[in-house]
Image: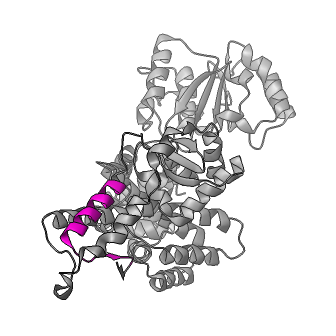
């Protein structure tokens, strides 16, 4: 009978356990020195090797010929435990044996000495599923078990384990396995199975496994069903992912504000039985990758893309700003929450995409760069953007700009009266209900109150880029209003001796424009 890969390639020695040296090294040292505990607790996410380590440990403490802390795998005891013929090693699924009666029965068995092995070993998987009564029944035995009994508890939800149980066990934490380690293991398995596995395909499987070796092998098993050659396209098809072509077309449609094209892509994938929630997650993950590439110096190792896809993503980044990318992710995450409750998930996704395609995608960094370029040109006496026939327009053309700058709010006076806002933390907590992503961007900020103004002090300009979008500014105002009961005008916090860069540029630009006598357009209207 065919044996699935994750069972066929289950580790038989501690050295075979991938990505958990902090566990395997300690266990081997304890076994070599004879310091065997009466109770172990293995905790970590699914598929990281908890049950495998438990079975190896059960063999190692009973092995007739241990080798450097590992079971030999050849003696009668090792073979009997592996085949399940030795009843001194008992594996219990706490999800289906979680009652008081089950644990009492187990407790009564512990008084009997082992029939064939040195120790009676009880492996209790998903131990967090035990009822409170069952935990209480286990407590006394776990604290003072017979000398011939060892308990190995495994759980994915350590927070559900009572403190009284935790304090009686030797705890080991299993980490998520890295993409590189999973890829190497997949290559090893593929070579031994006679399968051709592309490097990019192995990397994609590893990313999708999310740190779980068992999940990676299960997905690889499905891919083998398509043939003896596994490529990226086969992995995407086996996993039910949208092809990279459709994914990039969808993302590009959002960035280019082409709602029609985006809706066509959704329709195509819907007719191909693509799950709409999964599609929304994939688009969100794609923009998350864009955010990482935009933010990090060397994001290649943590971005699940082929080299060609990575280059395509870098080109797409030229069309959008970081603040817009964050807004797209936030909108899609909100859509996912609604889709979980919605009757028609396709409509929710379509509304989110149309909303993103309808918003203005003005990169504020580009605007500032253009302003600086114009200022330098004016200082040089060059009439920027002015038609030849209007090059000699009087200096009065720039007067409205100067008047607007001179009528600006006296920030020095506002800053002088500003006091720290004690409720700022509460405001951010309320903001999390709207958007965790936006609230996170404001985590390291401070706020000050001065009259009708709420001034925000930030170490970088990301919060201000977010607030320049009217929708996000209204969310912030709503959060402030909910906490304080008042509506404030929002602005940046600058010390009295400092000047706002935008105001300095505006004044300097206006002054030079007036001296040069050039025409200037504001919002498309000639001033």
Left or right: residue 3 versus residue 151 is left
Foreground residue among 329 and 135: 329
Foreground residue among 369 and 213: 369
Foreground residue among 299 and 472: 472
Look at the image and tell me whether residue 527 can be seen: yes
* 381, above or below 302, in the image: below
Q: Does residue 132 show up magenta in the picture? A: no
Residue stretch in magenta: 502-523
Left or right: residue 104 versus residue 87 is right
- Percent position (x, y) of residue 176? 48, 41
- Percent position (x, y) of residue 509? 27, 63
Look at the image and tell me whether residue 311 can be seen: no
Image quadrant in which the C terminus is located: bottom left
Rendered image quadrant of residue 351: bottom right
Left or right: residue 492 versus residue 298 is right
Residue positioned 58% across, 52% down in the render: 436
- Percent position (x, y) of residue 224? 43, 64
Rendered image quadrant of residue 18: top left
Helix, strand or loop: magenta stretch: helix
Residue positioned 52% across, 24% down in the render: 60
* 403, above or below 483, in the image: below
* 445, above or below 281, in the image: above
């Amino acid at each position: 009978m065919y044996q699935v890969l994750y069972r066929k390639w289950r580790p038989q020695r501690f050295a075979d356990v991938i990505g958990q040296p902090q566990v395997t090294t300690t266990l081997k040292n304890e076994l070599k020195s004879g310091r065997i505990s009466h109770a172990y607790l293995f905790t970590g996410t699914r598929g990281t090797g908890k049950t495998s380590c438990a079975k190896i440990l059960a063999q190692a403490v009973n092995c007739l010929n241990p080798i450097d802390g590992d079971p030999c795998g050849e003696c009668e005891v090792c073979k009997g435990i592996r085949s399940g013929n030795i009843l001194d090693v008992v594996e219990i699924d706490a999800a289906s044996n979680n009652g008081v009666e089950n644990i009492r029965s187990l407790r009564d068995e512990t008084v009997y000495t082992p029939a064939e092995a040195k120790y009676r070993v009880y492996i209790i998987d998903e131990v967090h599923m035990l009822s409170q009564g069952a935990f209480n029944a286990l407590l006394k035995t776990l604290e003072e078990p017979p000398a011939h009994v060892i308990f190995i508890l495994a759980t994915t939800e350590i927070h559900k384990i009572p403190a009284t149980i935790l304090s009686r066990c030797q705890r080991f934490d299993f980490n998520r396995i890295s993409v590189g380690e999973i890829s190497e293991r997949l290559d090893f398995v593929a070579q031994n199975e006679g399968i051709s596995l592309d490097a990019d395909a192995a990397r994609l499987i590893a990313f999708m496994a999310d740190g779980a070796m068992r999940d990676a092998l299960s997905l690889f098993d499905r891919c083998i069903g398509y043939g003896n050659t596994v490529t990226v396209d086969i992995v995407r098809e086996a996993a039910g992912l949208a092809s990279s072509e459709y994914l990039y077309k969808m993302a590009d449609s959002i960035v280019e504000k082409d709602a029609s094209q985006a809706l066509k892509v959704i329709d195509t994938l819907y007719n191909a039985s693509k799950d709409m929630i999964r599609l929304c997650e994939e688009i969100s993950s794609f923009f998350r990758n864009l955010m990482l590439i935009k933010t990090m110096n060397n994001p290649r190792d943590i971005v699940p893309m082929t080299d060609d896809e990575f280059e395509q993503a870098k080109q797409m980044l030229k069309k959008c700003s970081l603040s817009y990318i964050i807004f797209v992710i936030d909108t899609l995450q909100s859509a996912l929450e609604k889709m979980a409750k919605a009757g028609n998930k396709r409509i929710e996704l379509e509304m989110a995409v149309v909303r993103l395609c309808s918003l203005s995608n003005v990169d504020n960094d580009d605007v500032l760069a253009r302003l600086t370029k114009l200022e330098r040109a004016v200082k040089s006496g060059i009439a920027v953007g002015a038609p030849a026939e209007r090059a000699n327009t009087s200096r009065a053309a720039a007067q409205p700009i100067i008047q607007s700058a001179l009528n600006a709010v006296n920030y020095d006076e506002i800053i002088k009266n500003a006091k720290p806002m004690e409720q700022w933390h509460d405001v951010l907590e309320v903001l999390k209900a709207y958007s965790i992503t936006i609230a996170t961007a404001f985590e390291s900020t401070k706020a000050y109150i001065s009259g009708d103004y709420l001034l925000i002090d930030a170490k970088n300009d990301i919060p201000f880029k977010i607030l320049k979008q009217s929708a996000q500014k209204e969310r912030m105002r709503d959060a402030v209003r909910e906490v304080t009961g008042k509506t404030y005008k929002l602005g940046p916090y600058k010390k009295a001796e400092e000047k706002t860069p935008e105001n300095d540029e505006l004044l300097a630009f206006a002054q030079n424009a007036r001296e040069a006598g050039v025409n200037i357009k504001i919002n498309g209207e000639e001033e």
